[in-house]
Amino acid sequence: MQKLSKSNQTTMDKLTTTPRQPWQQPWNIFTPARANETIVACENVISGMPAKPEVKDGPQPRYHPSLDRIIMPRIECFISAEHYYASFFHELAHSVGHASRLGRGGIGGSPRCDEIQAEITACFCSVSLKIANKTIRNSSAFIQGYASSFDGSKRKGILRRLSLLAQDAADYILKI
């Protein structure tokens, strides 16, 4: 048997001892694990979104731009209702760029910019609906993870621009 190098062993130790973050939980729409209850204010925002994309059950949250469709696991598959809605808002943020809505397509010409913008949008929606207290740490880690790949001197400007776009998207979703 081949022995792991010290750096690989350290990585393996981290993977096996670090608790999973909510976004790393396995998705399984067929065996709901929790009895999460819907949050009426969040449901009202989602159902009232102008030109809302089609939403289907699926194993992992995802927006399909070519189909203008969001795939979402059921609420019971998330560690909390708040995490479900934060994920839903993230996917709705991706959909806002569709031609039938704000029509911006990809935000920054980069998938990482799109992900950051979508997560900041989800944060704005979550704060507005008073559910951010359970999700803000995950959102912060998500944004920091993607933003860390930007050059330090450009990071602030990129995040500022993405935050402005995220505010427009959140305003659209929340009908402000």
Image (cartoon, helix red, strand yellow):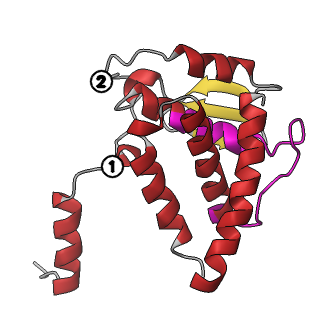
Magenta region includes residue 91: yes
Q: Quadrant of the N terminus?
A: bottom left
Residue 19 at x, y percent in the picture:
22, 52
Residue appearing at x 52%, y 36% in the figure: 86
Which residues lie in the magenta part? 86-112
Residue appearing at x 60%, y 33% in the figure: 128
Give the vertical position of 3 relative to 115 (above or below).
below
Task: Specify whether 39 is left or right of 111.
Answer: left
Marks 1/2: CA–CA distance: 16 Å
Q: Which mark is residue 56?
A: none
Mark 2 residue type: Ala
Q: Which mark is residue 21?
A: 1
Q: Within the image, what quadrant is residue 65 found in?
A: top right
Task: Specify whether 38 is left or right of 172.
Answer: left
Q: Secondary structure at mark 1?
A: loop
Q: Nearer the viewer, residue 148 or 31?
A: 148
- Is tag 1's residue or tag 2's residue first in the polypeptide sequence? 1
Residue 33 visible: yes
Residue 90 at x, y percent in the picture:
60, 42
The reply to whether the C-beta atoms of the residues labelled 1 and 2 are less than 8 Å apart is no
Q: Mark 2 sits on what residue?
A: 33
Q: Secondary structure at mark 2?
A: loop
Give the vertical position of 167 relative to 125 (above or below).
below
Q: Within the image, what quadrant is residue 50 found in?
A: top right
Q: Nearer the viewer, residue 42 or 31?
A: 42
Residue 134 at x, y percent in the picture:
39, 37
